[in-house]
Amino acid sequence: MIILGIDPGTATTGYAVIESAKGKLRAIEYGCLKTSKNNSLPERLEEIYKDLNSLIRKHKPGKVAVESVFFYNNVKTAIAVAQARGVVLLCARQNKIPITEFTPLQVKNSLTNYGKADKKQVQYMVKTLLNLKSIPKPDDAADALALAICGANHPHSFSPLSRGR
């Protein structure tokens, strides 16, 4: 199965495409979708939408794993992330791809067995589990890889076909 992991953001959205086959995980592609701060918010969200659709057409994932907005100290940041998340959820739903959402605590627990693990511990586990030569950069891409790993290891998804309005 191909899993698309997404760490949403308006300026930078981390993405990762991994394959899970016969109990092994393999990174296929990862990076960041960046938008220009000179563009309006609607333009930036449209750009994220188009880039995600391109990734979906290219890799045909069987599942999307996305970070859920759980808690932010900065309301402005939370709103921006929530708007980018909405685009991700819409894009997955329109492409009829099951969605699994994870909080940062769930990701940390899943990869390190410790909910208070720091970013470096999670990144080390991403490197190890995917047999990468180095810790993936930038952080948004590493976070998306961690989400994709969680998606690969999590048996339940929210099916966009079975959910009502």
Image (spheres, rainbow, N blue to C red):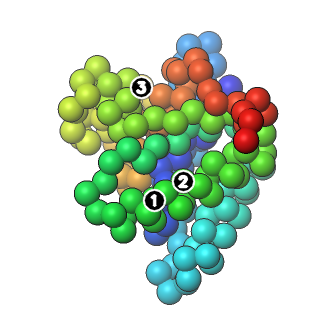
Is residue 117 rendered to the left or right of residue 69?
Answer: left
- Residue at image position (62%, 77%) is 43
Report how far apart the C-alphas of labels 3 and 1 lie in the structure: 27 Å
Amino acid type, callout 2: Arg
Q: Are marks 2 and 1 in contact (CB under 8 Å)?
A: yes
- Residue 81's disc is 1
Q: Give the Cα separation between the discs numbered 3 and 2.
A: 26 Å
Q: Disc count in the image?
A: 3
Q: Nearer the viewer, residue 27 or 121?
A: 121
Residue 32 visible, this orientation: no
Which of pointers 3 and 2 lies earlier in the amino acid sequence? 2
**Residue 141 vertical placement versus 147 (above, below):** below
Percent coordinates x, y for residue 98 in the rendering? 69, 33
Query: In the picture shown, does residue 57 fall above or below 103?
Result: below
**Image quadrant where one finds the N terminus:** top right
| x and y, in percent, of residue 113 in the image | 28, 20
Query: Label 3 amino acid?
Result: Leu
Q: Amino acid under label 1?
A: Val
The residue positioned 55% from the left and 83% from the top of the image is 39
Q: Is residue 57 visible?
A: yes
The residue indicated by pointer 3 is: 129
Circle 3 Cα neighbour tier, 10 Å, few/some/many (<14 / 14–19 / ≥20): some
What residue did someone put label 2 on? 85
